[in-house]
Amino acid sequence: MTDPEDPEFEPDPERVDALREVADEIRGESSERKQLANILYRTSDLYDESEDTSPEEIVRNVKFILEVTERGGLDR
């Protein structure tokens, strides 16, 4: 959960849009491109007032994304 007293992660729709726009631009067919786009989307959630997340939760999600990719996907 984002700390309401921490101005570093205050809602910022422009930052959300910018991060998600970059994510959309780099998303491609390769797993690396998809992985990076997913990480950018998760990072943008910190600044999206409709999301309830924390930097720690995002780090856990990114670690999971990397582990799944390393294993070859969710199907394995």
Image: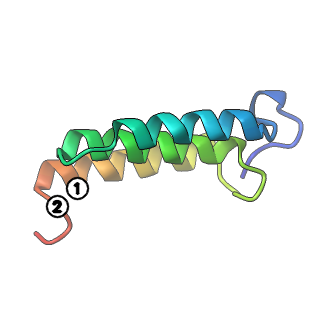
Q: In this view, does 53 lie above or below 12?
A: below
Q: Where is residue 28 in the image (x, y as percent from the top left)?
A: 26, 44
Left or right of 73? Residue 4 is right
The residue carrying mark 1 is 68
State the image quarter where residue 23 is shown: top left
State the image quarter where residue 76 is shown: bottom left
Q: Position of residue 48 (x, y in %)?
A: 71, 48
Question: Please, what is the three-letter code of the amino acid marked with disc 1?
Answer: Val
Left or right of 59? Residue 18 is right
Left or right of 5? Residue 43 is left
N-terminal of the two: label 2 or label 1?
1
Along the viewing direction, whichever of 21 and 5 lies nearer the viewer: 21
Query: Which residue appears at 75% of the width and 46% of the height?
Result: 2
Q: What element carries label 1?
A: helix
Along the viewing direction, whichever of 73 and 67 lies nearer the viewer: 73
In this view, which residue lies farthest toward the bottom? 75
Query: Which residue appears at 17% of the width and 44% of the height?
Result: 30
Q: Position of residue 14 (x, y in %)?
A: 73, 34
In this view, which residue lies farthest toward the right? 5
Q: Is residue 73 above or below residue 32?
A: below
The residue carrying mark 2 is 73
Number of numbered discs present? 2
What colour scheme does the image use? Answer: rainbow
Q: Disc 2 versus disc 1: distance between alpha carbons?
A: 5 Å
Label drawn at residue 31: none
Left or right of 28? Residue 41 is right
Question: Please, what is the three-letter code of the amino acid marked with disc 2?
Answer: Gly
- Asked if labels 1 and 2 touch by Cβ distance under 8 angstroms, the answer is yes
Query: Which residue appears at 20% of the width and 67% of the height?
Result: 74
